[in-house]
Amino acid sequence: MSENRVALITGAGRGIGAEIARTLAADGCDVAIVDYAEESAASETLEKLAACGVRARYYRCDVSDFAATKAVVDAVVREFGKIDILVNNAGITADKLLLRMEEGDWDRVLSINLKGCFNLIKHVTPYMMRKRYGRIVSISSVVGMMGNAGQANYAASKAGIIGLTKSVAKEFGARNITANAVAPGFIRTAMTDALSEEQKQAMYKLIPLGSLGETQDIANAVRFLVSDDARYITGVVLKVDGGMYI
Ligand code: NAD
């Protein structure tokens, strides 16, 4: 399906991004990981990618840095020859009720979660336009549609990704570049593992399918949206949330 494609995936050192990287690599994609953690933190992910027999490289970069992301995108194209797929996955939280939220909490979350997507899309699309091919998937959240007490900054950033995605879909459709978003609900990660049994039970009550999602559920949605099966799909927000937000 994705044979010989090159995918640039942000925040893929661990968590959901690492699962997306492994899943696309298993389909034969070469993978460029862009993450601001030390490369050593991604060694397990890089080993799994190598085991898929694809080319994989790690680029240490903060997605909120406009100039640095340009340099990385140029380097990926130099080293891999092209970028077919961009997955904007890097994201952080800095949860606080608005009454206690500092300006810095707002700026940091918006600049990584939302401006980071802008930076990568801005730098990657000129290359995609030349090839008249591109698949862009950005990871939003159901919280971007529902809102969430204590997450005004995060919810705003994830809602912003939806507006950005729909606009990019309209601007680049004629160039055969699609832009879609995936909105995960609660996914089993280190963060959710740390919750108490009581907190988990409270969460399950909100989810019609009655359990947390797995990172693979998100990776499967991304795999579909970048595949030829999704060639006529652009500007959508695919919720992968067990029915949490209907
Ligand atoms: P995670 O914290 O496990 O991984 C995030 C990765 O992004 C890390 O490797 C981190 O180093 C990297 N990163 C953070 N800031 C960066 C920056 N400025 N530049 C480059 N890389 C950076 O998170 P996760 O749970 O795997 O979440 C991945 C994405 O999915 C995020 O956008 C998150 O908001 C979204 N999401 C997660 C859930 C969930 O339940 N885990 C739910 C909805 C949405």
Image (spheres, rainbow, N blue to C red):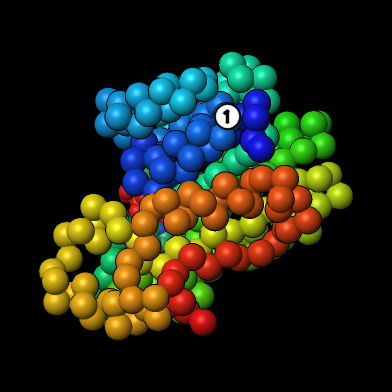
The residue carrying mark 1 is: 28
162 vs 105, nearest the viewer: 162
Residue at 14% from the left image edge and 77% from the top image edge: 198
- Residue 50 can be seen in this image: yes
Q: Position of residue 166 (x, y in %)?
A: 69, 62
166 vs 30, nearest the viewer: 30
Residue at 29% from the left image edge and 77% from the top image edge: 204
When the figure is inspected, residue 193 is found, relative to residue 134, above or below; the finding is: below
Disc 1 residue type?
Answer: Gly
Could you say whether the residue bearing mark 1 is in a helix, strand or loop?
loop
Q: Position of residue 26 (x, y in %)?
A: 50, 33
Residue at 23% from the left image edge and 52% from the top image edge: 190
Residue at 35% from the left image edge and 24% from the top image edge: 47
Q: Quadrant of residue 17?
A: top left
Q: Position of residue 80 (x, y in %)?
A: 61, 20
User: For the N terminus, which image quadrant?
Assistant: top right
Q: Position of residue 181 (x, y in %)?
A: 58, 59
Total label count?
1
When the figure is inspected, residue 95 is found, relative to residue 62, above or below; the finding is: below
* 135 left or right of 50 in image: right
- Residue 91 can be seen in this image: no
* 153 left or right of 40 in image: right
Q: Residues within 10 Å of mark 1 (few under 14, many from 20)?
A: many
- Specify the farthest residue to the top: 79
20 vs 33, nearest the viewer: 20
